Image (spheres, rainbow, N blue to C red):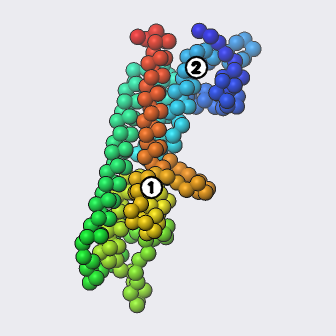
Amino acid sequence: MNTYKTADIARMFDIHVNTVRLYEKCRLIPQPERLSNGYRVFTDLHVEQFKLARAALQTEMLQNGLRKKAVDIIKTSAAGDYEKAAELTRHYIDQVEIEISNAEEAIQITHKLLSSMETEPNNKDFLLTRKDTAHYLHVTIDTLRNWELNGLFTVKRLKNGYRVYSADDLQRLKIIRSLRCANYSLSSILRMLNALSIDPGTNIREIINTPKQDDDIITACDKLLTSLQEAKENALFAAGQIEIMKRMAGTV
């Protein structure tokens, strides 16, 4: 195998030498051998492991433990247990595919709820308190308060100041709940709702997955469908890297 210095690895991946040392400290790569002068010696196996680690960490997916599972894959591979790493990667891909399915299903549910709001007559006499609404939707009062504070809906008030929720409010809240259960961010849901208020014919799937260019901070859940697909592609790449390293280590 070829051998490399710390600076060679840093240059190869366009990272700082301290980042290379951090990968070692965090056990994201195999422990490199050291020369008598203390210099680290990296091999082609380290190079392939770096490729795996950087791909697995590329997408910041936090929901349902996906980030931790990605780190577990990296550390297991770095420890040389390639069979276990391959198994963990398969489970990771399976979970990401479930997340993608949930995200797509939430969009379909949104379409159906919006359609029912357009076709079903509005019962103006139907009003629920915040407590009853939370119970009906199986969410907490704090969740409703959080959605309202983040501008996802505006609730009506009685003369005594008490909030009341209409049938249309419940449909809107069902949409929000469905999308939040699928891990869409509050900002992406608000972006979609605002777009629909301007143009009811807005492409929901496109708008909820496309952050505005002037957004200061964009998280993975602000472009959930794209991020999940990227996470799957990176995991498939990681699976390929594991097979490469298995062959290099002579375990197959």
Q: Which residue is mark 1?
A: 208
Q: Nearer the viewer, residue 131 or 175?
A: 175
CA–CA distance in space, label 1 to label 2: 39 Å
Question: x, y (%) of residue 106?
Answer: 34, 54
Question: x, y (%) of residue 198?
Answer: 45, 68
Q: Which residue is mark 2?
A: 46
Question: x, y (%) of residue 52?
Answer: 52, 27
- Callout 1, which amino acid? Ile
Kindly indicate the quadrant of the structure image that contains residue 46: top right
Residue located 45% across and 48% down the image = 224
Q: Is residue 131 visible?
A: no
Looking at the image, is mark 1 or mark 2 nearer the viewer? Answer: 1
Kindly indicate the quadrant of the structure image that contains residue 112: bottom left
Question: x, y (%) of residue 151?
Answer: 48, 69
| Up/down of 148 relative to 49, above or below | below
The quadrant in which the N terminus is found is top right
Residue located 43% across and 40% down the image = 229
Q: Residues within 10 Å of mark 1 (few under 14, many from 20)?
A: many
Left or right position of 170 against 193: left
Residue located 70% across and 28% down the image = 17
Q: Residues within 10 Å of mark 2 (few under 14, many from 20)?
A: many
- Callout 2, which amino acid? His
Residue at disc 2, secondary structure: helix
Q: Is residue 188 visible?
A: yes
Q: Nearer the viewer, residue 77 or 154?
A: 154
Kindly indicate the quadrant of the structure image that contains residue 126: bottom left
Residue located 43% across and 11% down the image = 251
